Structures are given as structure tokens and as C-alpha cells.
Amino acid sequence: SQELEQSPQSLIVQEGKNLTINCTSSKTLYGLYWYKQKYGEGLIFLMMLQKGGEEKSHEKITAKLDEKKQQSSLHITASQPSHAGIYLCGADPLGSGAGSYQLTFGKGTKLSVIP
Amino acid sequence: NAGVTQTPKFRILKIGQSMTLQCTQDMNHNYMYWYRQDPGMGLKLIYYSVGAGITDKGEVPNGYNVSRSTTEDFPLRLELAAPSQTSVYFCASSGTGGRNSPLHFGNGTRLTVT
């Protein structure tokens, strides 16, 4: 089965600093999804990457997919307290089958932003 | 929009008791899922459904049952609660189940079995 390793496990940054979270897969990545979770809430969809080399941005968050390295990175520019939470990556295993959508998730990266 | 709604938000069960976690969505999504999230362990898929009347096992189905009688509802049943089922449970739905369809999650049910 596919495994996703996220690094770092936790991160504390000063407000205004940039940061990067990585997600590395044990198998070929077909699609990679980034979610954000706040305590007591569900997961909020951030971005989906489908092609090697693909890069997407939303506000101050940029995600990239390096298919050859089986890795994705999430970069936050000029972090704010509102960015605090747990970031999870999820991957759609290659060959999971038509009509099947069973994401595998990483264990998450806990981000704290100090004002 | 309500999206995916889960009830209850919290529950404490004694070993051997049973309960049903409710999940409903108002987005007319065909695909629905139940995940559990344990501290430091990420999300594990329990069961999923591709449409009314169709369900299938995920990675960790033992001790759970599901049904899907309508498009909107996907309840999760625990028959004989065990301490190992202490977890946070998330219900999710997606439009087509395809790779272009992100999951929409509910806010979770925090279950403690003692």
C-alpha cells in the first residue's frame, strides 16, 4: 500500500516568516491533495495537483508536485496566525480503479504561528 | 450551504455498547466515506459508498457497519464498542469519486470508549 511521509511533524514559526512542508510518497504519485485541519473541525480542501511539475497557488500558499521525486511541497509565504493548523497531504494511488477514490493520507504537519 | 453534517459531535460509550454515527450531505454527492483519525496516525478509511445501496470496505472495517439507503445519508454503526475504537470519526463526500473531485469533510465525531 502507498505510504505518505510528511515533514516536519511540527513547525513553529514567527509571524511573517516563510515555511515549507513536504510530503513524500513510497509509490508513484498520480494525484496529490493538500488539506488543512483546525482543532475540532474537519479538513478543508486547499489544492489538488495532478501532473508532474504542476504548481498551484492560492493567496499565500503554493503547492508543487515533483512526480519524479514522488514528492510534493507546500510553501507558505509571510505566514499569519490564520495559517496555524494541521496540514495533511492525501494521495490517490495509481491504479486504484475506475470509480474508486480511496485517498491515503499522511500523518499531518502541525503548524503554529507566533504573533 | 450545510455541506456534510455529522452528529453527535462528542460521545462517551462504555465497552460493549452500540451506537450509530450519523452523516448527511446536501450536495447530491454519490460518493461518501468514513474515516477515523487517531493521534499521530493520520486518517484511515473505514468504509465507503459509491451510491445508494452500494458500500465497500476500506482499510480498517472491522468492528463497524454501514448502510446507504439514500444518497444523502451514510450512517456508521458500532455494534460492540471497544477501547480501540476511541478516535475521531470523519464523514466525507465527493461528487464523482474521480481524481478531479476533492473530498468534502464533516466536522467530526469525537468518540471515547471506556
Image (cartoon, rainbow, N blue to C red):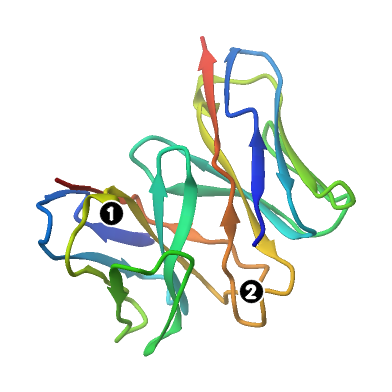
Q: Residues within 10 Å of mark 2 (few under 14, many from 20)?
A: some
Label placed on residue A88: none
Q: Is residue A36 above or below residue B85?
A: above
Which type of secondary structure does the marked residue at label 1 adopt?
helix
* Mark 2 on the same chain as mark 1: yes
User: Percent position (x, y) of residue B58?
Assistant: 47, 70
| Residue type at the position of mark 1 | Gln
Residue at the spot 58% in from the left edge and 29% down from the top edge: A9
Q: Residues within 10 Å of mark 1 (few under 14, many from 20)?
A: some
**In which quadrant is the N terminus of chain B drawn?**
bottom left
Residue placed under numbered mark 1 in the picture: B85
User: Percent position (x, y) of residue B87?
Assistant: 31, 48
User: Percent position (x, y) of residue B65?
Assistant: 29, 75
Residue placed under numbered mark 2 in the picture: B98
| Chain of the residue displaying label 1 | B
Which type of secondary structure does the marked residue at label 2 adopt?
loop
**CB under 8 Å between discs 2 and 1:** no
User: Percent position (x, y) of residue B2?
Assistant: 34, 59
| Residue type at the position of mark 2 | Gly
Lower sequence index among marks 2 and 1: 1
Residue at the spot 37% in from the left edge and 43% down from the top edge: A41
Q: Is residue A64 above or below residue A31?
A: above
Q: Is B36 displayed left or right of A18 in the figure?
A: left
**Residue furthest bottom as drawn:** B53
Alpha carbon distance from label 2 to label 1: 30 Å
Q: Is residue A59 above or below residue A115?
A: below
Q: Nearer the viewer, residue A99 or B71?
A: A99
Q: Nearer the viewer, residue A105 or A83?
A: A105
Query: Could one spot residue A112 in this view of the protein?
Result: yes
Query: Could one spot residue B29 in this view of the protein?
Result: no
Q: Is A67 displayed left or right of B77 in the figure?
A: right
Residue at the spot 29% in from the left edge and 86% down from the top edge: B69
